[in-house]
C-alpha cells in the first residue's frame, strides 16, 4: 500500500509547492531552550512500565521518562547513567554500582539504591507479568550497603549482566510499594527520573511529555515531546509533508526517490542514515535433508547476490554483513567478508553434494529427485521482495524454491515452534551485548527456544559458554570474533543484509549529529534544539 | 406481540452461547498466542518466562476449561481484562486500588466508531435514495447513465487509495482538512464551537470514505427496487386514474420500493459497531475496527471475545428490530407477527 501511495506522490511530484515558501531552515542559529517536537509512532503503548509493556512503542516513550544504571554512549560502549561508576570483583562474580549524588525522582523525592533493589525484586518476582526476568534471576544476592551503593552477586561470572543493567529501567519504590505492578495505575501516569515527565496521555491520540525540572541528567533543550499515534506509514508521511509532525522513519522509496525529487521537501526536511540494529537472513532447518549438508548450504550462499538484494529491496540503503554484529562496533570481526555471488561455484558444490542430473525444466536432480522447498516468511514487504529475488537466483542454478508468506503469530506458533519448515527468511534484532547463547548454543533447541534452526557445533558451544564468563571486553572480543568466523564458514544461515534506518527530521530541529554515530542520531536528543523563529506558534506557548 | 418478542429474546440466549463457543474454539484453532507477540520473539525473553506468562493468563489450561472460565465471568457481564494492553478492562471502566478510574477499551473506542458510522449511514441514506430514484425514473437516459457510472466507480475504487489521495489533496496541497486523527493538538484550548468544528473537519474524510461503497450499493438497490415497482400493475392503474406523476412516483412507488431497505438497515447495526478497519487505520482513528484488528494480530483473546460477543448480540437484536420494523411497515407481514 505504501508503495502505491509513493508512486501516486511521485506522479504528483511536479504539483504545487505545499506550504509555500517558509523561513530559511538552513540558516544557523545558536542553541536555545524551548519549543515542541512532534513525532509519530505506529502503535500506542500498552502502558509505560517498561518491564511489563514489552513493545517498541512503550520503550520509545519510557526511555525519555526512566533511567537505568548504565547506558550506551555514541560508540555503543557502556557508561554510567544513574551509576557514577561500577566495578567488577576479581572473581568476576560481583558487580558494585555507585550511584551519582543528589539523584531525584520527578516528584522531588530522593532516588537511592533502595529503588534499584526494589526494581530488581519486581522484575524477578514470579507474579510480575514480564517476559524479561531471566537475566535478573541469575543474581543470587542483591544488596544495598548504603543509599548510594547497589551490589549484585552471581553464582558464576555472567558477562551479559552489564548489558542487562543497561536495560532495566529503575522504578520508584515510594510510589509502587505494596501495589500490584501488573494493574497499578502508575502504568498510565508514571513518575521517573529522566529528562522528561508525562504531561498528558490521550488514549488513541497522543502522549505528550514535558521537561522534568528534577531530571537526574540535567535539563534537555526542547521543552515538550509529543508522540502522535498514526498507524499507517503513508498517513505519517502526509503529516510530515504538511508540517504536522517533525520526524518519522522513511522507507527507501520515500528517502531516495520522493524527497530528493521535490525542491519543497528538500528545503524543509533533513535526511539521515543510521545502521539499524538488525539483519535479515535466510535460515536453513539443519535437521532436514539436504540442509544438514554444508555443501548445499554454501552453494545456496554463493548463489544469492546480496548486493542485488540491497540495491533492489533497499534501493541501496543497507550493507552486507558477515557476522551477527553491527558493523562498526568492536564485536564485528573485520577479517570476515560475505560469500561472493558465484553461481558456478554454487553449481560445483551442488554437484559435489550429489546433485548431478537435471530434469526437463533444468532443475537439479539427486537420485531422481528435485531439490524443492518452501521459503517461509512473515508479512513484511522487504522480506517478501527479498524472497522473490532469492527464488529467482536459486532457480538459475536449478533449485526450486516456493514462497509462503504468513501472519506473524501463526508463523511462530505453527512453523517455528514446531520446527516444521525447511527454509525461513527472517531477521534478528541485535542486542548491543555480543552474547548470542540463546540463538546459537546447541542446548537451545527445544520448542519455543531460539535455536530453532537446530545449529549444533561443539566449538561454537564452547566459545559461547566462554564468552558469557568473560567480563573483560578485549578478551571477549577475541572469543566472539572466532565465533563469527566459524558461523560464517558453517553457513547455517545466509546473511542477506542489514538495512539502514532512514529518519527524516524537519530542518527546524537543530543539533543533530550527521553522519550518525554507531548509536544512531538519537543518542544526544537532549541536546537538539528548535530556534525560536522556527517554532510552531500554536503549541509552543 | 409481547409473546412473540419474549420468545425471540429467549431464543437469543442459547444462540449467543453457541456463537461464543464457536468463536472461542475458532480463535484457539489459530496458531500462536499473546506470548508470541508480547515478547516479540526476543532472545531476552526466555521460554521459562513465557511459560510463566501463559500460566498467568490461563493459556496452559485446555480450551474448554478456558471457555468455562470465560463463560462464568460473562454471566456476570464481566468481559475481563486485556492481555496485551497492560490489564486494561475490555468493556467498561473499573477503579483500581487507589480509586483511579481506568477506562474500558470498548468504552473508549465505541463512541467514535458509532459516530462515524451513524454519520456515514446518514450520508448513505440521504444521498442514495434520491440518486436511486432519479436513476430509476430517468432509466437509460443521461442522468441514469451518470449515476450508474458513479455507482460503479464507488464500487471499484480502492477505499484506502482514494483516502490517501484525498488526504494529500485536501490536507497537504490545500490545507482544507486535517489529515489524520480525531482532534487537533490544541483541541482542548478551543471554544465549544471551535471544538465541534475541529471534530467535524477531522471526521469529514473518514465519513465520506466509509460511506462511499455503501452509498454506491444502496443507490443501486433503490434504483432496481423502484424499477420493479414502476412496472407493477397498480402503478399503471394509478397513472391511468390520472394521478400526477410525482404522486405516483413518490407516494405510491417509493414507499414500496423502500421496504427492503428496512431489512438492510437492521442488518447494518452490527456493522455500526465493527466499524471500518481500513478507514480507522489510515485516518489514525482509535475506533472498534482498529481495536479488533490489533487484538486479532496480538491474539488478545479477552478483547476479541468481548467484541465478538457484543457484535453477535447486536446482530441478533438488529435482526429482531428489522423484523419488527418490516412488520410495522408492511401489513402483509404484520399478520404473521402480531
Image: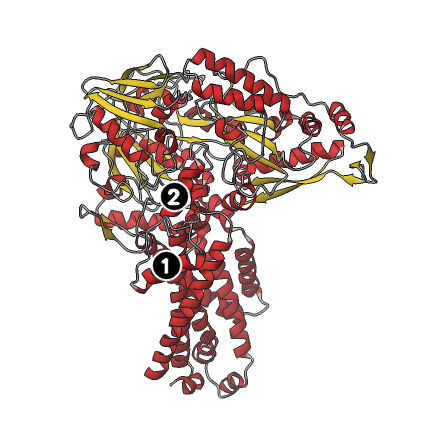
Where in the figure is residue A536, as x and y percent of width and height?
A: 30, 30
Residue at mark 1: B70
Q: Going by the image, does A483 lie left or right of B290?
A: right
Visible in this render: residue B75?
yes
Badge 2: chain ID: B
Q: Foreground: A209 or A390?
A: A390
Query: Which quadrant holds the N terminus of chain B?
Result: bottom left
Say which residue appears at 59% left-offset and 43% top-offset: A405
The image quadrant that residue A282 belongs to is top right
Residue A221, above or below B89: above
Relative to B77, is A352 on the left or the right? right
> Farthest residue toward the left?
A109
Q: How crowded is mark 1: few (under 14 residues within 10 Å), some or many (20 or more)?
A: some
Which dot marks residue A493?
Answer: none
| Image point (25%, 42%), residue name | A180
Q: What element carries label 1?
A: helix
Which image quadrant is residue B184 in? top left
Rendered location of residue B67, percent (x, y): 40, 59
Amino acid at each position: 500500500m505504501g508503495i502505491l501511495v509513493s508512486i501516486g506522490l511521485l506522479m504528483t511530484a511536479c504539483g504545487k509547492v505545499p506550504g509555500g515558501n517558509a523561513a530559511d531552515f538552513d540558516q544557523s542559529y545558536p542553541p536555545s531552550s524551548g519549543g515542541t517536537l512532534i513525532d509519530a509512532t505506529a502503535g500506542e503503548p500498552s502502558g509505560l512500565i517498561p518491564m511489563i509493556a514489552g513493545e517498541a512503542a512503550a520503550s520509545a516513550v519510557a526511555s525519555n521518562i526512566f533511567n537505568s544504571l548504565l547506558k550506551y554512549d555514541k560508540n555503543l560502549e557502556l557508561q554510567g547513567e544513574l551509576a557514577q561508576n561500577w566495578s567488577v570483583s576479581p572473581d568476576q562474580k560481583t558487580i558494585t554500582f555507585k550511584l551519582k549524588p543528589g539523584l531525584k525522582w520527578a516528584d522531588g523525592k530522593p532516588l537511592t539504591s533502595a529503588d534499584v533493589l526494589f526494581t530488581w525484586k519486581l522484575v524477578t518476582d514470579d507474579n510480575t507479568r514480564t517476559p524479561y526476568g531471566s537475566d535478573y534471576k541469575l543474581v543470587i544476592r542483591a544488596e544495598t550497603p548504603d543509599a548510594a551503593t547497589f551490589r549484585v552477586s552471581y553464582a558464576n561470572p555472567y558477562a551479559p549482566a552489564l548489558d542487562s543493567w543497561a536495560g532495566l529501567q529503575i522504578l520508584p519504590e515510594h510510589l509502587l510499594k505494596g501495589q500490584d505492578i501488573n494493574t497499578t495505575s502508575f502504568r498510565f501516569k508514571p513518575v521517573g527520573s529522566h529528562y522528561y515527565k508525562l504531561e498528558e496521555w490521550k488514549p488513541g491520540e497522543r502522549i505528550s511529555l514535558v521537561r522534568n525540572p528534577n531530571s537526574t541528567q540535567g535539563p534537555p533543550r526542547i521543552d515538550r515531546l509529543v508522540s502522535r499515534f498514526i498507524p499507517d506509514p503513508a498517513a505519517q508521511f502526509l503529516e510530515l509533508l504538511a508540517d504536522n509532525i517533525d520526524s518519522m522513519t522513511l522507507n527507501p522509496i520515500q528517502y531516495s526517490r520522493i524527497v530528493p525529487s521535490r525542491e519543497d521537501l528538500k528545503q524543509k526536511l533533513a535526511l539521515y542514515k543510521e545502521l539499524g540494529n538488525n539483519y535479515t537472513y535466510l535460515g536453513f532447518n539443519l535437521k532436514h535433508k539436504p540442509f544438514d549438508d554444508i555443501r548445499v548450504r554454501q552453494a545456496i550462499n554463493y548463489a544469492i547476490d546480496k548486493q542485488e538484494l540491497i540495491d533492489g529491496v533497499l534501493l541501496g540503503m543497507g550493507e552486507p554483513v558477515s557476522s551477527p554484529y553491527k558493523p562498526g562496533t568492536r564485536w564485528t570481526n573485520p577479517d570476515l567478508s560475505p560469500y561472493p555471488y558465484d553461481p558456478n561455484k554454487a553449481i560445483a558444490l551442488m554437484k559435489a553434494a550429489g546433485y548431478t542430473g537435471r530434469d526437463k525444466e533444468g532443475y537439479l536432480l539427486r537420485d531422481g529427485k528435485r531439490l524443492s522447498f518452501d521459503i517461509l516468511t512473515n508479512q513484511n514487504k522487504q522480506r517478501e521482495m527479498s524472497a522473490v529475488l532469492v527464488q529467482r537466483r536459486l532457480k538459475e542454478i536449478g533449485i526450486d524454491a516456493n514462497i509462503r508468506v504468513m501472519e506473524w503469530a501463526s508463523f511462530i506458533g505453527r512453523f517455528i515452534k514446531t520446527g516444521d519448515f525447511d527454509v525461513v527468511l527472517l531477521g534478528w534484532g541485535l542486542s548491543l551485548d555480543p552474547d548470542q547463547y540463546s540463538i546459537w548454543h546447541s542446548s537451545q533447541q527445544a520448542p519455543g527456544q531460539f535455536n530453532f534452526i537446530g545449529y549444533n557445533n561443539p566449538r561454537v558451544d564452547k566459545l559461547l559458554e566462554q564468552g558469557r564468563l568473560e567480563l573483560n571486553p578485549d578478551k571477549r572480543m577475541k572469543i566472539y570474533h572466532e565465533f563469527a568466523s566459524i558461523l560464517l564458514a558453517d553457513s547455517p544461515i545466509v546473511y542477506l543484509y542489514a538495512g539502514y534506518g532512514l529518519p527524516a527530521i524537519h530542518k527546524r530541529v537543530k543539533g543533530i549529529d550527521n553522519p550518525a554515530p554507531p548509536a544512531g542520531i538519537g543518542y544526544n536528543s537532549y541536546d537538539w534544539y528548535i530556534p525560536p523563529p522556527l517554532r510552531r506558534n500554536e503549541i509552543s506557548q | 406481540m409481547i409473546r412473540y418478542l419474549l420468545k425471540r429474546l429467549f431464543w437469543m440466549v442459547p444462540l449467543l452461547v453457541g456463537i461464543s463457543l464457536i468463536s472461542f474454539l475458532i480463535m484457539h484453532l489459530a496458531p500462536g498466542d499473546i506470548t508470541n507477540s508480547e515478547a516479540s520473539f526476543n532472545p531476552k525473553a526466555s521460554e521459562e518466562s513465557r511459560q510463566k506468562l501463559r500460566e498467568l493468563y490461563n493459556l496452559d489450561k485446555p480450551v474448554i476449561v478456558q471457555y468455562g472460565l470465560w463463560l462464568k465471568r460473562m454471566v456476570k457481564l464481566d468481559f475481563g481484562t486485556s492481555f496485551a494492553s497492560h490489564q486494561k478492562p475490555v468493556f467498561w471502566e473499573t477503579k483500581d486500588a487507589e480509586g483511579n478510574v481506568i477506562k474500558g477499551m470498548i468504552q473508549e473506542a465505541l463512541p467514535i466508531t458509532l459516530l462515524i458510522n451513524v454519520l456515514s449511514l446518514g450520508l448513505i441514506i440521504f444521498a442514495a435514495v434520491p440518486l436511486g430514484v432519479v436513476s430509476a425514473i430517468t432509466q437509460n437516459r443521461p442522468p441514469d447513465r451518470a449515476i450508474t457510472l458513479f455507482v460503479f466507480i464507488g464500487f471499484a475504487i480502492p477505499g484506502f487509495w482514494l483516502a490517501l489521495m484525498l488526504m494529500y489533496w485536501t490536507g497537504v496541497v490545500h490545507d482544507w482538512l486535517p489529515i489524520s486523527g480525531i482532534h487537533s493538538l490544541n483541541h482542548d484550548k478551543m471554544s465549544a464551537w471551535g471544538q465541534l468544528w475541529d471534530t467535524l473537519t477531522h471526521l469529514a474524510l473518514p465519513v465520506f470514505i466509509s460511506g462511499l461503497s455503501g452509498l454506491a450499493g444502496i443507490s443501486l438497490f433503490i434504483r432496481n427496487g423502484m424499477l420493479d415497482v414502476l412496472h407493477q400493475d397498480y402503478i399503471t392503474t394509478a397513472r391511468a386514474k390520472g394521478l400526477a406523476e410525482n404522486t405516483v412516483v413518490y407516494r405510491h412507488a417509493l414507499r414500496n420500493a423502500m421496504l427492503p431497505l428496512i431489512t438492510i438497515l437492521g442488518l447494518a447495526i452490527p456493522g455500526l459497531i465493527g466499524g471500518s478497519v481500513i478507514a480507522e487505520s489510515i485516518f489514525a482513528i482509535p475506533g472498534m475496527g482498529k481495536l479488533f484488528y490489533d487484538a486479532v494480530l496480538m491474539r488478545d483473546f479477552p478483547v476479541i471475545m468481548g467484541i465478538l460477543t457484543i457484535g453477535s448480540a447486536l446482530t441478533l437484536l438488529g435482526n429482531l428490530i428489522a423484523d419488527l420494523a418490516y412488520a410495522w411497515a408492511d401489513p402483509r407481514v404484520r399478520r404473521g407477527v402480531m
